[in-house]
Image (cartoon, helix red, strand yellow):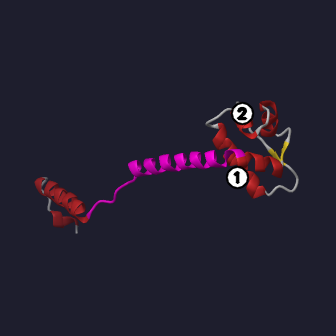
Amino acid sequence: MGEISPVPAKGLNPVRFDRFKSDLDLLLGVMTQEELGEGMGIKRSNINRYIKGTLKITKGFLKKFYAAWEERITEERDKVKSTDSEYDQQTEKKEPTMSELLTVLLRIEEKIDKQGGTAGAAR
């Protein structure tokens, strides 16, 4: 797929436009430009012009975009959050318990004793 560089029409809220770009990127990760346009009643060639910045993104375009795709965007965001959450849970570092720390310290003391030193010598 080509470069994504939509351009806002004059007076379009910058925060709303940034959100649109993020949502557009999300949708284009799961569908084609043709599918995107079909859902909005816009030809693929015109969708491409909007995406590349030849045609400016207007309030009217955003209304059509979100009327057609808001539910799908929410679903896709939820999938991303769910995947991120699963990843976080799998990679989450668990803090050792006091019991586990004590066990490690006792093993260290035993090794020091076996090597001829004393555990208290380091104090």
Q: Position of residue 122 (x, y in %)?
A: 22, 65
Is 89 magenta? The answer is yes
**First reached walking from the N terminus: tag 2 or tag 1:** 1
Say if mark 2 contacts mark 1, CB within 8 Å. Answer: no
Identified by mark 2, the residue type is Gln
Identified by mark 1, the residue type is Arg
Vertical arrangement, residue 101 with respect to residue 44, above or below: below
Left or right: residue 93 compared with residue 23: left
Q: Find numbered disc 2 in the image and state the secondary structure of the residue it sits on.
A: helix
Residue under label 2: 33
Q: Residues within 10 Å of mark 2 (few under 14, many from 20)?
A: some
Quadrant occupied by the C terminus: bottom left
Residue under label 1: 19
Report how far apart the C-alphas of labels 2 and 1 lie in the structure: 18 Å
Q: Position of residue 37 (x, y in %)?
A: 74, 36
Quadrant occupied by the N terminus: top right
- Identify the magenta region: 68-97
- Residue under the point 53% across and 46% down: 79
- Residue under the point 40% across and 49% down: 91
Vertical arrangement, residue 72 with respect to residue 42, above or below: below
